[in-house]
Amino acid sequence: MPMTDSLQLVLFLAMIAASAPLLGRYMARVYEGKGTLLTPILAPVERTLYRLAGAKVDKDQHWTTYALTLLAFNLAGFLLLFAILRLQHLLPFNPQDLAPMGTRLAFNTAVSFVTNTNWQAYSGEVALSDFSQMVGLTTQNFLSAGTGMAVAVAVIQGFSRRSARGIGNFTVDLVRGVLYILLPLSIVLALLLVVQGVPQTLSPYVHATTLEGGRQLIAQGPAASQIAIKQLGTNGGGFFGVNSAHPFENPTPLSNLLEMVSILLIPAAFCFLFGRMVGDTRQGRAIFAAMTLLFLAAFAVVYAAEHAGNPLIPALSVDQTAGNMEGKEVRFGVLNSSLWAVATTAASNGSVNAMHDSFTPMGGMALLLLIQLGEIVFGGVGAGFYGMLLFVILSVFIAGLMVGRTPEYLGKKIEAREVKLGLLALLSMPLGILILGALSTVPAAGLASVQDAGPHGLTELLYAYSSATGNNGSAFAGFGADTPYQNTMLGLAMLLGRYAVILPMLAVAGSLVGKKAHAETAGTFPTHGPLFVGLLVGVILIIGGLTFFPTLALGPLAEQFAMVGGHVY
């Protein structure tokens, strides 16, 4: 790796490692209801929101009540966003007089943003009014991210509380996450992006005359505010069609660095929030170490593959060290394109500064596998952490079987109920990817979306359903998503990937919160050292490999061997 690439990678990792513990400590105080520097300013707003919602903030909710409140709130958000998209031609802030979005595309988009997927089968600058972007999409960027964070806190409280009945209050957890964490960070990031040249305006699009005398329409709008929360909330939905490859969304190397750090900042901070809330910071550091190891392994594969490029065309490269630059912005190069791609698929972010369809087969496979693992390598805000806790439960259970003891984690026994619920949540990914994806290979309406033949075409379809089920939102550029069939099926995959994990994990929290904690003994398996980190990483890779390796062998692996053999698709 060239020295400049090494320094950029070290800077990125150092910024995450330095800021995540500080933010995690702050987030723990927020969710525990302790005072912060923002409390004098935001506490009156918080109390007003509780009164408007009619919430009983001092009353903990049983996990079933917590889940029903969450589902009702998300359903209301879906209906509101769907109505905005269908009626945008009648609503204000529509300077281009854009028509309403079609019914099935509006369904897909509303599901996408409510589930924190932000899958986009449209180009924002030509399909959505400023009102739809601001009131519709940006609002859901906050609320869907806040929902994931609230669920993660509820699951953490299932481990941290002793012999309790409730796992928290959804309204309180949601309001605190949005008001004290997402909103302040987004304001700061939006201002930094404006300084870097990202537009934030309600002015109409600009008509320009090119040097050749042609006419060009330059799209603009309230972009910086949406981009800030799309990164911090691991939403990923771009204001412009080409997302963070667009110079208005990501104009400079500094904006690129800030946005990449923002993608992983809150997910990484959840590790340290967990350590503080359960009273053992070593536990949070162990999970952070496991995530970091998996992240670095994935990055090493992607960077090596993209830096090597396609062996069939070395003579055509002007710069023999450039690697595979197809689909990448020259101003970002291989390093920043690879690092962003790994960050956005490790988290359920989905924003892109390069086209994943143009990555080498091995590079694309690593990105695909990161999503298929459940996006637990830091993952989405909240969602990645409770997904990782699912694998922690399975790892502790397997360790207990190996040593002949009842498995325990943080002093609480992991019994058949928790394991069954965890396995139920784990099934959501293969169901959405393999079953729904397979159904798209049968009808002509499903196959019509696949652009390329052979294994690359299979990878396009596999990536689409992995992205939807994993609530990621990125796509291989060759996949035609805006069809009635795919809008419906991918919408169902998004719902499955979101709520088929949330509900079992809330049930796990409800089961654990009522248990007493047992003191550690000499026979207790330590869950904060290198041995546990290795076991956790191994369980994740084995489960992911057993589930998805056959399809990966037919898609990107087959394409890799074909490319080496001189055949491309």
Image (cartoon, helix red, strand yellow):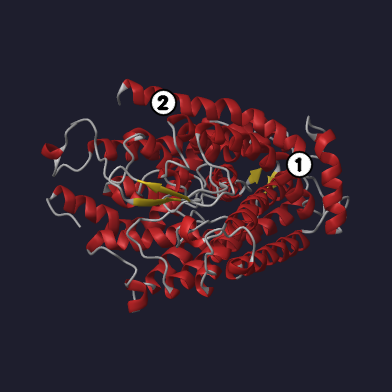
Task: Please name the amino acid that badge 2 sits on.
Answer: Gln
Residue 68 or residue 512, whichever sits in front: 68
Local packing at callout 1 (Cα closer than 10 Å; few below 14, some 14-19, many 20+) is many
Q: Quadrant of residue 559?
A: bottom left
Q: Report whether 396 appears left or right of 256.
A: right
Q: Check residue 31 in the rendering and tell me which mark sits there, or answer none.
A: 1
* Residue 395 visible from this viewpoint: yes
Residue 189: x percent and y percent? 59, 35
Q: Check residue 449 in the rendering and tell me which mark sits there, or answer none.
A: none
User: Which residue extends farthest front?
Assistant: 213
Q: What element carries label 2?
A: helix
Instruction: Identify the residue at horizontal 30%, vertical 26% (top origin).
Output: 1
Q: Check residue 8 in the rendering and tell me which mark sits there, or answer none.
A: 2
Residue 366: x percent and y percent? 36, 46
Residue 547 or residue 419, whichever sits in front: 547
Residue 225 or residue 361, whichever sits in front: 225
Local packing at callout 2 (Cα closer than 10 Å; few below 14, some 14-19, many 20+) is some
Q: Quadrant of residue 286?
A: top right
